[in-house]
Every structure is written in C-alpha cells, then in structure tokens.
Amino acid sequence: MGQTLRQEEEIMKLVTYQLEREQKTRIGVLNQDETWVYPIKSIGVDYSKMETLIEEIGESELQLLEYTSKKEPYGIHGAAPVGEVRLLAPIQYPKQDVICLGSNYMAHAEESARFKQEQFDGKREHAVYFSKRVNKASADGDPIPGHFDIVESLDYEAELAIIIRKEAKNVPPEKVKEYLFGYTIINDVSARNVQRTHKQYYFGKSLDGFLPMGPCITTIDTIPYPPKLSIQSRVNGELRQDSNTGLMIFTIDHIVSELSRGMTLQAGTIISTGTPAGVGMGFAPPRFLKAGDVVECTVEGIGSIKNRVE
C-alpha cells in the first residue's frame, strides 16, 4: 500500500516557531534538508499566523515559498538553524473543534470492538464522526498531562490530519483536493475510562493537552493524491502502530464531500482521519500509558512528533 513520494526538492513544509530566548511567534518554511527555517516575512510573504496564511495565501506566494525553500540560507534575512528554534503546533489555537473519524481502519475497528466486548461484523457502512475540543494544540516535545486524578486508561492514536484551504460546501468527491491546504500529524490522546463512563467520545478526547500536533504542515501538492503513507506510533521506542493511510475505510474525498453536504467547512478546519490498529486498548491485556512514557507518532512525508506523559 506504500507509495513513492516525489523528489525531495518538491517537498514544502511550513512551520510555526519561536527563536530561542524569544516569545515572538513566527511562520517559516523549512529548507529542503530541514536544517534551516526561513521566516516567510523575509521572503515578502507577510502573514503573522498560520490560520491567516491558509485562508489568504495565493498561488504565486506559495510558489515563491517553494522556490525559496530550495535556496541556501546565506543571504536570507532571519534564517535560523533548526536546532536554535522551537517548533510549535502549526495551528496553535484551532478556531473550531477538530473533526475526528472513529474506527476508520478496519483492524482498529476490530480491536475497538474487542475492547468494548461488542460483536463486530466486519462492516463499516457509514463514517463515525466526533469532535475534539482544543484550547491549545501541543507541540512536538510538549508534555502530555495524564490527568491521572480522573484518567485510568490513557491511550495514544497516531493520525493523519488534513487542513481545509477554503470554504467548502456541497463539494463533490472529485473536487475535494482543490479545497485542501495540507497535512499534519495528530496524536488523538484519549481517556478510555472517561469515554466508557460518559458513553461518548467528547469529554474523554478533549482534556487539556490531549492534542499534540505537528511538526509542520506539508502542503497538499507535496504528496501524490490520495495519500498512501506509512503511519506509525512508538511507545518508549517500541513500535505499536504500523500501517498505511491507504487503508482508511472512508477516504479523504468521501469524508470532506460527505461533511460538506450538511455543514460548511471553513478555511483552517482540521479533520483527523482516524487511527490504525495498535493502540493501547487493542492489546490483551491493554497497554495504557503511564507517567514517564514517551509516545512518538510518525507519518511519511510529514515527520514525527514525540511527547512525554506527565
């Protein structure tokens, strides 16, 4: 199910970052070997927030950023080595709840049914949608608060997320790509016992710090569409999830088209497309997270985010 990505020089990754010893938030583009960050303002692309860039950037500006990302850092004002910056979540404050897909990989649907002690017939006729409240998205390296005063079964879920580029309403499946800006990685951290107690996803998915995101946004044309990318998670270095986004039951085209028939998807909307098998609740016995555990989520063509449970 894998695919060969385009040549490295075509990849463009946008980041939200801060320089060391500075609180000012900047938007930048990574150079091709991902060793330098170029502030977009120094290139003449003047957006202070990623959300604004997504809504307003034009094709000529995107082309300028892509062209600049291929250049050497010398002579680019404000260029900084990656080791001297702190990458933040690319969209720190989503303006609406993140839309999530439940059980969108067949093997995960099976393990979820086992955990719930439910019968599973191997069919998924309709997508399962839910929302995840996010006050502030966490960055690579930020801690995951365990909330162990109310959480007994803390779990991880590596997911590919898509970001809507422009207002989408009644979009046919074959036109969906035109409405997408890019991809990022999300760890859909989940409190399973809270989900079971309240018999719904919302509270158990929405505790503070439960949305690590990043490390960048890879623009949509970087990766052949639809994306068929390796997706993995590791806990303390041990491979737990190992699948491919080409195995999603409901594709990105289906998801965006279906949602847009009943609701208007605004620019900047984040949709997390579900997680494959290998989450903590899927093991027998379950292998939930504890304080000190380090979770790393990786998606081909985007990168990795690593967060420690506290």
Image (spheres, rainbow, N blue to C red):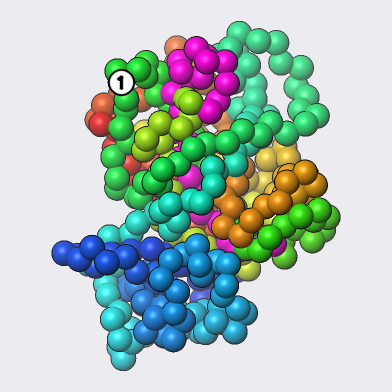
Task: Report if residue 188 lies within the magenta region.
Answer: yes
Q: Where is residue 12 in the image (x, y as percent from the top left)?
A: 50, 71
Closer to the camera in the image, 213 or 306 = 213
Query: Residue drawn 50% across and 12% down?
Result: 197
The relative height of residue 21 versus residue 42 in the rendered view (above or below) is above
| Residue 219 among those drawn in magenta | no
Question: Which residue shows up at 72% across the image and 37% down it?
Answer: 249
**Which three-letter amino acid code belongs to the residue tagged 1?**
Phe
Q: Say which element carries label 1.
A: loop
Q: Position of residue 34 (x, y in %)?
A: 38, 69
Q: In which quarter of the image is residue 145?
A: top left
Residue 147 vs 45, above or below: the answer is above
Q: Residue 167: horizontal and vertical position, in percent?
A: 68, 60
**Residue 126, located in which quarter of the rendered image?**
top right
Q: In this view, does 300 lie above or below 258?
A: below
The residue identified by callout 1 is 148
Q: Read off the magenta span.
A: 179-202
Q: Residue at x 29, y 18 (%)?
A: 149
Outermost residue to the top: 117
Residue 162 image offset from top left, x and y in percent? 59, 53
| Residue located at (71% from left, 51% from top) | 264
Q: Is residue 8 visible?
A: no
Mark 1: few/some/many CA within 10 Å (<14, 14-19, 20+): few
